[in-house]
Every structure is written in structure tokens, then in C-alpha cells.
Image (spheres, rainbow, N blue to C red):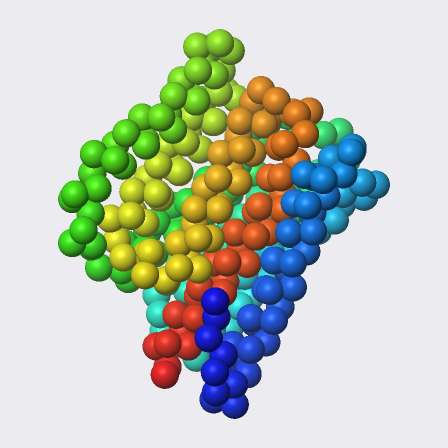
Amino acid sequence: MIDLKGASSVPWWYRSGLAFFSLLMAGSLVLVLAVLLLPSHTFEGFGTVSNGLQFLASITGMVVCAALFIFWSRDLLLIYAGFAFGGWTLANTFWYAYTLIIGPTLMYPTVSEAGLLGFFLFLASGYTEVFPVSARSQPRSAGIALGLILLFSIPVYLILHLGLTLSTGVTLLFFLFSGYLLLVSLSCQVYENRFLFAGTCMFIVAHLLYAVRETAFPDLWPFRLVGPLIVLSFSLLEIGLLQRVREERA
């Protein structure tokens, strides 16, 4: 839980950011429940609401990172995270603009996937820049290796059954970048900020589901969770960044 004891000493920007991203989290959880509990696993306007919340979360994340860096902190992680959110926002702006103005749905993969993949690299680079390497990473190496082997069995399965195509190749990239970000998060002390770590893991899960959905299962209802999970991951990441800046200034 977030400790707000002594609320009068909590900076206004922290309270405001926490409230905003908590509302986004609540919205994402409502969408998750709709997918899991509604008989049709969706409702009219679900896609519009989900896409809108994703765009709002990403662009707000970019603005908040910039504002925190300019006015309250010189934490380099804010620069990396700001570029990550900015790249993700530009990628989705391109996708939305194309589909809304021109009309036809773009076939996966598109140039927008470059912005999605860039998020992984910016976040991983920021973590290696600001977090020290964990002394406890070595004993976990066997478990991490086993987990990565199981993880990469999914794109290997897709390649074996669908062939090595542009779609399966880009999906493999999503798994490679996810594995890299996960390794960085576990080998560095990212887990000490539980919101950053939870947001990172949620971001990885959401985009792996996205890649698999676009490659092989576009109509399978559980993959409708992708959008809400992305909103949830962005909200957790931003709360983690806010908490990090607040602790730095305490």
C-alpha cells in the first residue's frame, strides 16, 4: 500500500499524480472485469474506451516525466521513461491517425511496432543507468534461465507452425526484448520499487499477449485484456516514478 501518513507533508504534485493514475488503474480494472465477467466478454464501445485510456496513460506519462525532470528532479530515469512513453505515444498516434482518417485496418506488423519495442529498450537502459546491480542475482540464475526457456517456447512454437514470416519474426523480437527487460529488472534492484517492478512485469505480459494475439489469435476473447493491462502497467510505472522522486526529495 502507498503510505500517505502525514498527508500535509506530501507534495501536491505527488498527491495529484497519485490520484490521477489511481483513477486510470480503476478504469483499467473495470475493463478487465468486463472482459472476464460479461457473457460477451465485451460491451459496445469497449475498443474505443480501451484505446482512449491507453493513449491518455501514455501521453500523460510522457508529460509527467518531463515535468518532474524540469521542476522537481534530475533523475535520469525520468528522461529514459519520458522517451519510452513518447515513442509509444507516437507509434499509437500513427496507428490511430491512419485507421481513423484513411480507414483500412493495418496488418500486423507495422512501423508502429518499432515504437512499442523501443519502450523496452528505453526502460531497460534507464534501469541499468540508475539502479545498482543486485548482489542476489547469481543464486537466481538457474530459475531465470528456466523461465526464459519456457518463455521462448511460445515464439518457437509459432514459427514451427506458421513459418518464419514477418509476423512471427516481429513476435520473436517482442519476446527477445521482453526477456532482456526482465533480466535487467531482476539483475538490478528495480524490485525495491514495487510499483516500478510491478508495472514493468505488467508491461511485458501485456505486450507478449499483444504479439501473440496479432500473430495467431486475433479473435480469441482473453486477448481483449491487452489494452486494460497496458493502461494498468503505465499507471503502475508512473506511480513508481512519482514515489522515486518523492523519496529523493524527502
Q: In this view, does 201 lie to the left or right of 87?
A: left
Q: How many marks?
A: 0
Quadrant where the image shows the C terminus: bottom left
Residue in view at x 74 percent, y 35 percent:
41
Residue appearing at x 20%, y 54% in the figure: 134
Of all residues, the one furthest to the right in this rendering is: 44
**Looking at the picture, does residue 41 appear above or below residue 201?**
above
Left or right of residue 206, residue 32 in this image: right
Rendered location of residue 247, percent (x, y) = 37, 76
Above-or-below relation of 14 to 38: below
Res 118 seen here: no
Look at 56% across and 38% down and name the residue there: 112
* Residue 13 position in % (x across, y down): 54, 79
Is residue 109 positioned above or below 68 on the image? above
Query: Can residue 246 be seen in this snapshot?
Result: yes
Q: Residue at x 66, y 36 (%)?
A: 224
On screen, residue 49 versus residue 81, left or right, reads right
Residue 81 x %, y %? 44, 58
| Residue 76: quadrant of the picture | bottom left
Residue 182 position, x and y percent, is: 34, 43
